[in-house]
Image: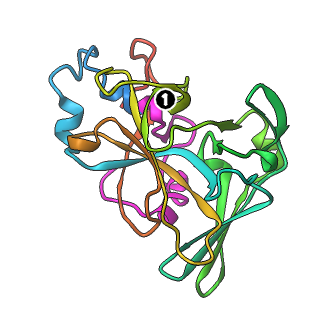
């Protein structure tokens, strides 16, 4: 999609695409597009178009700045004096071999499979609220992951680097996980869309710390006959 988008603008994108046949690219979609075994991209077509830019993906995550504390009912992100609150739903997830409420997850992050499961509302001059569109829509579409914090690791089925699978950067399948370590006063954590590097030094990075005000690229993919993969 032409142009760059801030995190707040990401919530408006589903209304600009054909939701029956298109969606905001997920982590695996980006990996597929960069796959050098793919005849369409063997010559680096996708990186040639995107350059060294960062691409926000459809997955949306939330984590506590204190990894020992559970997510709780709400996470507050503060940026340039603007507050962004997200309500954490009381939905069951599997984490460390147990089935618990997402609100009780500590030492990991909650991941919504798509930003389309969420909505944003301005609640004050410098305050916004992010909330699930409806409990029924979340069933089976929210999970908890042990994301690799600032290190290399093998990925899970969704393309996210797992903390329990550390790896060497020499492994081409490994990804570098990167999370926020600096927070403004009042922030209790971070929430937002994952960003994926598609070229340069960040080409194998999965980032969960992008500024809300920082514009980045967005890719839209559509379902279609393409050897089992999405059509880009």
Q: Does the magenta stretch include residue 191?
A: no
Quick one: 19 or 218, which is closer to the camera? Answer: 218
Q: Residue at x 65, y 57 (%)?
A: 66
Q: Is residue 109 left or right of residue 2?
A: right
Quick one: 110 or 193, which is closer to the camera? Answer: 110
Q: Which residue is drawn at 53% across and 83% down?
A: 81
Q: Is residue 7 magenta?
A: yes
Residue 10 rendering spot, x and y as whole percentages: 49, 58
- Residue 39 location, quadrant: top left
In the picture of the structure, the residue carrying the numbered disc 1 is 159
Magenta-tinted stretch: 1-29
Q: In this view, does 104 lie above or below 38?
A: below
Q: Is residue 129 above or below residue 68?
A: below
Q: Residue at x 61, y 71 (%)?
A: 187
Residue 79 rendering spot, x and y as whole percentages: 50, 74
Q: Is residue 57 left or right of residue 192?
A: left
Q: Which residue lies furthest to the bottom in this view?
A: 125
Quick one: 115 or 18, which is closer to the camera? Answer: 115
Q: Circle 1 — which element?
A: loop
Quarter of the image with the C terminus is top left
Residue 61 rendering spot, x and y as whole percentages: 59, 49
Residue 204 rendering spot, x and y as whole percentages: 33, 35
Q: Residues within 10 Å of mark 1 (few under 14, many from 20)?
A: some
Q: Is residue 165 left or right of residue 117?
A: left
Task: State the scheme by which the image is colored.
Answer: rainbow
Q: Residue at x 57, y 78 (%)?
A: 185
């Amino acid at each position: 999609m032409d142009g760059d988008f801030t995190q707040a603008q990401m919530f408006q994108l589903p209304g600009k695409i054909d939701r029956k046949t298109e969606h905001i690219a997920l982590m695996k979609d980006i990996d597929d597009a960069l796959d050098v075994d793919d005849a369409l991209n063997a010559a680096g077509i996708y990186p040639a178009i995107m350059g060294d830019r960062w691409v926000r993906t459809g997955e949306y995550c939330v984590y506590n700045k204190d990894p020992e504390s559970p997510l709780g009912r709400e996470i507050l992100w503060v940026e340039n004096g603007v507050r962004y609150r997200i309500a954490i739903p009381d939905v069951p997830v599997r984490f460390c071999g147990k089935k618990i409420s997402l609100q009780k997850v500590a030492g990991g992050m909650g991941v919504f499979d798509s930003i389309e499961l969420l909505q944003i509302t301005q609640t004050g001059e410098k305050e916004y609220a992010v909330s699930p569109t409806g409990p029924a829509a979340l069933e089976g579409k929210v999970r908890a992951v042990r994301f690799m914090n600032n290190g290399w690791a093998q990925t899970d089925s969704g393309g996210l680097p797992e903390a329990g699978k550390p790896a060497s950067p020499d492994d081409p399948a490994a990804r570098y996980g990167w999370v926020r370590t600096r927070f403004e006063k009042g922030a209790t954590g971070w929430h937002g869309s994952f960003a994926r590097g598609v070229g340069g030094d960040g080409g194998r990075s999965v980032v969960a710390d992008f500024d809300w005000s920082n514009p980045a690229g967005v890719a839209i993919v559509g379902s279609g006959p393409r050897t089992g993969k999405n059509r880009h």
